[in-house]
Image (spheres, helix red, strand yellow):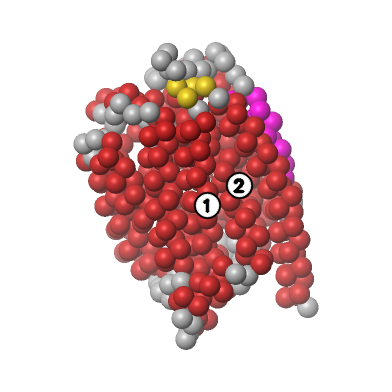
Amino acid sequence: MQSSAPSDTFSPYQKFIIVTIAVLQFTVILDFMVLSPLSALLLKELQVTTTQFGLVVSAYAFSAFASGIAAAGFADKFDRKRLLLFFYIGFLIGTLMCGLAPDYYSLLVARIVTGLFGGVLGSIGGAIVTDLFPMSARGRVMGVVQMAFAVSQVFGIPVGLLLANQFGWHAPFLMIVGFSSVVGVVIFTFMRPVRDHLHLNLGRHPMLHLWKTVTQWPYIKAFLATTLMTTGGFMLMPFGAAFSVHNLGITNDQLPILYAITGVFSMIFGPIIGRLSDRVGKYPVFAAGSLLTMIMVAIYTQRGITPFWFVIVLNVLLFAGISSRMISSMALMSAVPEPHDRGAFMSINSSVQQLSGGVASAIAGTIVMQTRSGLIEHYDVLGYVVIVAIAITIAMMYWINLQIADKQAAHAR
């Protein structure tokens, strides 16, 4: 049941939910994103090829896809708090396995386990937000929740890199386990049950619920848009740190500074973008962010040795565009499913996101090559693919926006 509170104010408990979901997202995102800045270190330490490293990244995504599909039919059958805790505990176990992995194959298995549980958490958090907040406020809520990406850059990734440089690549994962354990205790102790959706699905068989959700044309269009939106980020991300070090010429010691500065600006941009999407409209913000991202990808992937200050500028502008796309699209997508399909839709959408991301990471690993000197070749080719994918999603999200507007107009009548 959505809150009836005015869209410009939040109750203390609503604020607690926003912060809690954002912090939970921070731990899950950090667990995934920390692999990218560790790429330069892991390629050397584990003696693996770019293709093998791409598989480590995509293994998480593929297992997350499988678990998301499996959980979709049951996502609206349980108290969302209990579901959240169940998968969060599994996520902690998988991350601990990463922190203890002695070799490449152990790490690969650990990433599969982590993906089985961690990949579903975002969809459960999204369903909770959609249950508790009206559409008019979701831009602001998503703006805060998506600050998790920025915070992971400001605090998590730099600290993780410092720990990795000092104590080895296992240390960041163990840090995540320790912090996430505290978050789990807070959720268990203070979050209230989220059960208002249960009466909407009485008597519906889980498999029938899943089938009806994946076969509705409005939902299918949303899933297709998610597929293309994910392709871009997952293609560039796995080798971003290696490209920055070996091609742009920054040092491993400068990487934490780069991520921290970029993250600070992303933290500032997030709430602003969220408020702007509520006031101006979700789609206009998405389209503007997409255009900015296309321009920055074209510039970034073509660079050679670059002054550090200019690398910072490029990253800040690139992530401003990415944040605009993510925040506005998440707020817009939250209006696509009907209330009784919300959990299933979010779970399937997350699974589609993970699968397309896994495919993109695996493909990226076969396109780029690392020379004997360390240079990352063909990164510009990835940039071209990303730009095409972004251009298509601008059109697809336009039709989804019209679909949502028609549905809201029909409900108003």
Against 162, residue 132 (above or below) is below
Against 379, residue 283 (above or below) is below
Gap between marks 1 and 2, in whole Å? 8 Å
Against 336, residue 329 (above or below) is above
Q: Mark 1 is on which residue type?
A: Gln
Q: Which residue in the structure is indicated by mark 1? A: 353
Q: Nearer the viewer, residue 300 or 27?
A: 300
Task: Quadrant for the C terminus, please.
Answer: bottom right
Q: Mark 2 is on which residue type?
A: Met
For numbered disc 1, what is the local secondary structure?
helix
Q: Position of residue 272 (x, y in %)?
A: 63, 44
Q: Residue at x 46, y 67 (%)?
A: 72
Asked if residue 353 can be seen in this view, the reply is yes
Q: Is residue 38 left or right of residue 287?
A: left
Q: Residue at x 61, y 47 (%)?
A: 228
- Specify the farthest residue to the front: 366
Q: Residue at x 32, y 63 (%)?
A: 86
Which disc number belongs to residue 57? none
- Which residues lie in the magenta part? 287-301
Asked which quadrant contains residue 39, the reply is top left
Q: Nearer the viewer, residue 201 or 217?
A: 217
For numbered disc 2, what is the local secondary structure?
helix
Q: Which residue in the structure is indicated by mark 2? A: 229
Q: Position of residue 130 (x, y in %)?
A: 55, 65
Q: Residue at x 74, y 54 (%)?
A: 398
Q: Are marks 1 and 2 in contact (CB under 8 Å)?
A: yes
Q: Position of residue 279 (x, y in %)?
A: 72, 53
Q: Is residue 150 left or right of residue 103?
A: right
Task: Quadrant for the N terminus, please.
Answer: bottom right
